[in-house]
Image: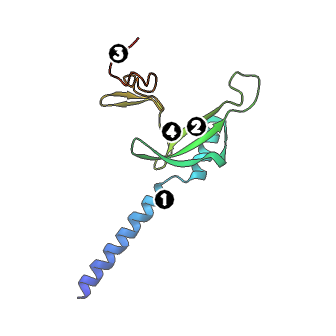
Amino acid sequence: MRVKTLILAAAVLAAANLAAAGEAAAVSQQEAERKVAEDFGVEVLTKRTRAGEVGGRAVWFLTVMNPGGTANDAFQVNTLAVDRETGELVPAFRHNPSGYELPGASSLDDQSGVRPDMSGSLPWR
């Protein structure tokens, strides 16, 4: 009986250590914002940061703004995806088994939104 109790206690402690290690590996929103601001010299618009998912990966979507100045990209605003596990940027251009994917891109074969009267029944040019 005592051996079973010791084994159960050891299993509970091991599970707690694994859970704590998993939580420690995750990148918090503030850590991701700080790292991106330091690495890229941008201002992170913290009120627009949100959690999301890209390709099955949990990410932070950070909206960032370039600093002012005389360059063409002054005050340019972009949204970056940061992996919540590693803290690394998730590239916008991703290779998939069937080709590549761009964020916000729609299928070129879908013409129903362009010409609703056609509904894809006849090709038009």
Look at 64% across and 38% down and name the residue there: 64
Q: Earlier in the sequence, mark 1 or mark 2?
A: 1
Three-letter amino acid code of the residue under disc 4: Leu
Which residue is denoted by mark 4 in the rendering? 89
Q: Position of residue 4 (x, y in %)?
A: 24, 82
Question: Alpha-carbon neighbours of circle 4 within 10 Å: few (<14), some, or many (≥20)?
Answer: some
User: How far apart are the alpha carbons under marks 4 and 1?
Assistant: 19 Å
Which residue is denoted by mark 1 in the rendering? 24
Quarter in which the N terminus is drawn = bottom left
For the residue pair 41 and 120, the one nearer the viewer reads as: 120
Q: Earlier in the sequence, mark 4 or mark 1?
A: 1
User: How far apart are the alpha carbons under marks 1 and 2?
Assistant: 25 Å
Above or below, 109 against 21 in this view is: above
Above or below, 28 against 95 in this view is: below
Q: Nearer the viewer, mark 4 or mark 1?
A: 4
Question: Alpha-carbon neighbours of circle 1 within 10 Å: few (<14), some, or many (≥20)?
Answer: few
User: How far apart are the alpha carbons under marks 4 and 3?
Assistant: 40 Å
Q: Nearer the viewer, mark 1 or mark 2?
A: 2
Three-letter amino acid code of the residue under disc 3: Pro
Quarter in which the C terminus is drawn = top left
User: How far apart are the alpha carbons under marks 4 and 2?
Assistant: 11 Å
Which residue is denoted by mark 3 in the rendering? 123
Q: Position of residue 96 (x, y in %)?
A: 34, 31
Which residue is denoted by mark 2 in the rendering? 79
Secondary element under disc 3, as helix, strand or loop, is loop
In which quadrant of the rendered view does residue 80 lie? Answer: top right
Three-letter amino acid code of the residue under disc 2: Thr
User: How far apart are the alpha carbons under marks 1 and 3?
Assistant: 54 Å
Q: Position of residue 79 (x, y in %)?
A: 58, 37
